[in-house]
Amino acid sequence: MHAAYKKQEDPHRGDAITALNSKPSKPFKFKKHLVHLFLLPALLLYVVFQIYPILAAFYNSFFDFRGYVRMHFVGLNNFVKLFTESPYNERFFNAFGHNILYFCVVFFSELCLAFFLALLINSVTKGREFFKFVYFAPKLLSVIVVGFLFNLILNPIHGALNAFLRAVGLDFLTASWLGNPDTALFAIIFVSSWYGLGFSMLVYLAGLQSIPQEIYEAAKLDGASGWRMLFNITIPMVMQSIMVTVILTFIGAFETFELIYAMEGSSGSPYYATDVLTTYFYRLAFGSIGSNSSIGLGSALAVILFLLVACASALLLVFFRKKEVDY
């Protein structure tokens, strides 16, 4: 009788125990999650203007075009044509070489010269803000405006540079800076270095000012000299700033377009001496190179440029991560 009585009570007892052990569910806070909806407009714009063009370029690179109309699937034919068929391959490797040269020269100026300027400005106590403004001021100008101004300055007849050289008796140095294939690209690289020098200097200066002074004082007590402190303390501790500068310089060198377009147009004149991958892409996709397959070839070039910049940036990131020093 007792067992039968217990058997009748067991189902209700189990439900009661479950109810006692279960925690009260928290009410869904709608207002708390409502804030995430504010990200949707920015996310939508990012997808439309950043992700979609990349995906469209990948897709279009596998097709032949007639004008702006997508025609036949051609597989990797656009990529093969870009690397093997004349004059596409000649233009590609010529532009790629100019991008490499552009990066090397800008890298040297913005790594060495900007770092040297940052060291000088960091060492002064008075006028620091003034020098920071002076070197950063060119960055406040539009690239198109800078290109137009230097077009006037470098004019072979009425330009200020040749006029200055003549005034100081250095007539033999006057030249058609933008008209000579030997000097045109270097003139543009010089302008680009001048334009970006202040930004790199500020990045280095931020890194220098974040180094604790106690480390330098301890090094002095150990007998470390200026050069030894520079190579063993300063440079390793601003490695993060160097990483940012190098990666941005590399991306900027392979994405440069506005300055070259403003100073030499999209034709890479004179005689393709200032042609880079972005101006070559512009001519392929929107210019006069090729006939029906220009957009397909241009998309293939855009894909190559994207993969090149992405892979190189990832490798540089991994390289500099290993060089970072924690303190």
Image (cartoon, rainbow, N blue to C red):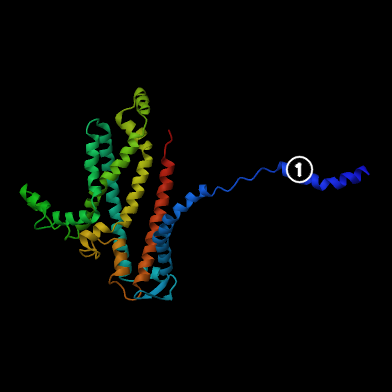
Residue 243 percent coordinates (x, y): 37, 44
| Quarter of the picture holding the N terminus | top right
Q: Based on the displayed image, in which of its 4 quarters is residue 97 positioned?
A: bottom left
Q: Quick check: 170 left or right of 202?
A: left
Q: Based on the displayed image, in which of its 4 quarters is residue 47 positioned?
A: bottom left
Q: Nearer the viewer, residue 273 or 157?
A: 157
| Quarter of the picture holding the C terminus | top left
When the figure is inspected, residue 62 is found, relative to residue 11, above or below; the finding is below
Residue 249 percent coordinates (x, y): 32, 50
Q: Quick check: 212 left or right of 36?
A: left
Residue at the image point whose x is 26% and y is 62% from the top: 275
| Mark 1 residue type | Ile
Residue 27 percent coordinates (x, y): 59, 47
Element type at mark 1: helix
Residue at the image point whose x is 29% and y is 51% from the top: 104
Q: Which residue is mark 1?
A: 17
